[in-house]
Image: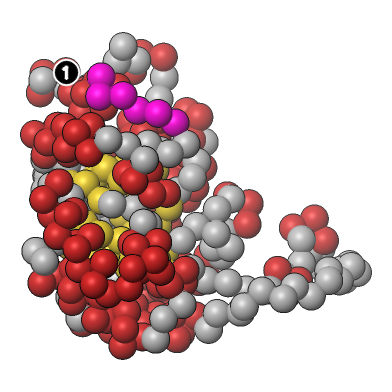
């Protein structure tokens, strides 16, 4: 299949490594928002497999899919050097069954062939030491641990884009009752998770980088500055967000994207083509 990718080339000084990669990782969203059959997954892996590092069964979708399908999909991913993540389902297991059920869940994930288990620290709402214990349980089970953190802030503290002209009156928005997360405290928790053995820290897109016109660049810069670009992963829900991350932090930033963005993202990683994400791929790059 290598001959099909002759059009793709990096700059001579490009230092992004080949798979398996520790950074510059592209994790692909699996079944949740759309149904990906085995045939579709096979086509994605055969046509773009060298650009895909991970596959994530997001939103607990793996709990609704037959185990036979999950096992076949995981085996298919492994054939193309693609790791597979559970997505955020561990929280449900812990709420319904506690630590003993979580231990069984880790073992079941290993038997199915999963490589990574995610832990949504915000949904769990547990003490930090308990979170660290679960991270160690995952690592002791022979799997990779990826805690997820979300930053919550009061949106009324930030004026709307169209009201930011100098001297203009900003109409105050009602104060929300949302929990305001201390970013430094969040980063410290993430650092302790890494010290406990966590492999990657996932930053939830909500309130940080869900939309291109409301990116909290200050929070992202602080997270990357403290944790490092190699140890963090961000969700890029559309091509504009992916372009923003690549332009700011280079091709080695780790991104979680939809399967429809894989080729577009890889072109951005390789040559930073175009000033607008729509110009990255031309009609001559259709694979099918």
Rendering coords of residue 101 (x, y %): 26, 67
Rendering coords of residue 7 (x, y %): 22, 22
Task: Kindly identify the residue that appears in the image at 31 percent across and 24 percent down.
Answer: 37
5 lies above or below 91: above
Task: Read off the magenta span.
Answer: 34-39
The quadrant where residue 135 appears: bottom left
Rendering coords of residue 171 (x, y %): 89, 67
99 lies above or below 34: below
273 lies above or below 227: above
Task: Kindly identify the residue that appears in the image at 42 percent across and 49 percent down.
Answer: 59
Q: Nearer the viewer, residue 107 or 26?
A: 107
| Residue 54 shows up from this direction | yes
Q: Say if the magenta span includes residue 279.
A: no
Left or right of residue 177, residue 235 in this image = left
Residue receiving disc 1: 4
Q: Say if the magenta span includes residue 36.
A: yes
């Amino acid at each position: 299949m290598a001959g099909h990718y002759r059009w793709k080339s990096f700059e001579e000084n490009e230092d992004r490594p080949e798979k398996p990669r520790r950074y510059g990782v592209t994790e692909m969203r699996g079944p949740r928002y759309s149904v990906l059959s085995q045939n579709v997954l096979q086509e994605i892996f055969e046509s773009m497999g060298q650009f895909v590092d991970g596959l994530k069964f997001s939103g607990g979708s793996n709990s609704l899919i037959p185990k036979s399908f999950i096992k076949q999909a995981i085996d298919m991913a492994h054939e193309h050097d693609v790791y597979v993540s559970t997505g955020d389902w561990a929280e449900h297991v812990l709420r319904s069954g506690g630590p003993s059920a979580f231990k069984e869940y880790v073992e079941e994930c290993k038997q199915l062939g999963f490589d990574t288990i995610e832990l949504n620290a915000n949904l769990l709402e547990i003490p930090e030491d308990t979170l660290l214990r679960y991270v160690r349980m995952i690592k002791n089970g022979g799997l990779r641990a990826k805690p997820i953190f979300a930053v919550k802030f009061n949106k009324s503290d930030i004026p709307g884009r169209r009201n930011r002209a100098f001297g203009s009156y900003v109409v105050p928005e009602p104060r929300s009752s949302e929990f305001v997360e201390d970013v430094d405290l969040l980063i410290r928790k993430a650092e302790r998770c890494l010290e406990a053995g966590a492999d990657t820290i996932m930053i939830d897109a909500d309130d940080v980088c869900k939309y291109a016109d409301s990116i909290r660049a200050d929070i992202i810069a602080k997270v990357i500055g403290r944790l490092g670009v190699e140890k963090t992963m961000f969700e890029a829900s559309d091509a504009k967000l992916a372009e923003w991350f690549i332009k700011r932090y280079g091709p080695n930033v780790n991104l979680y994207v939809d399967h429809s963005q894989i080729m577009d993202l890889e072109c951005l990683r390789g040559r930073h083509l175009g000033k607008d994400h729509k110009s990255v791929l031309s009609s001559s790059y259709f694979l099918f």
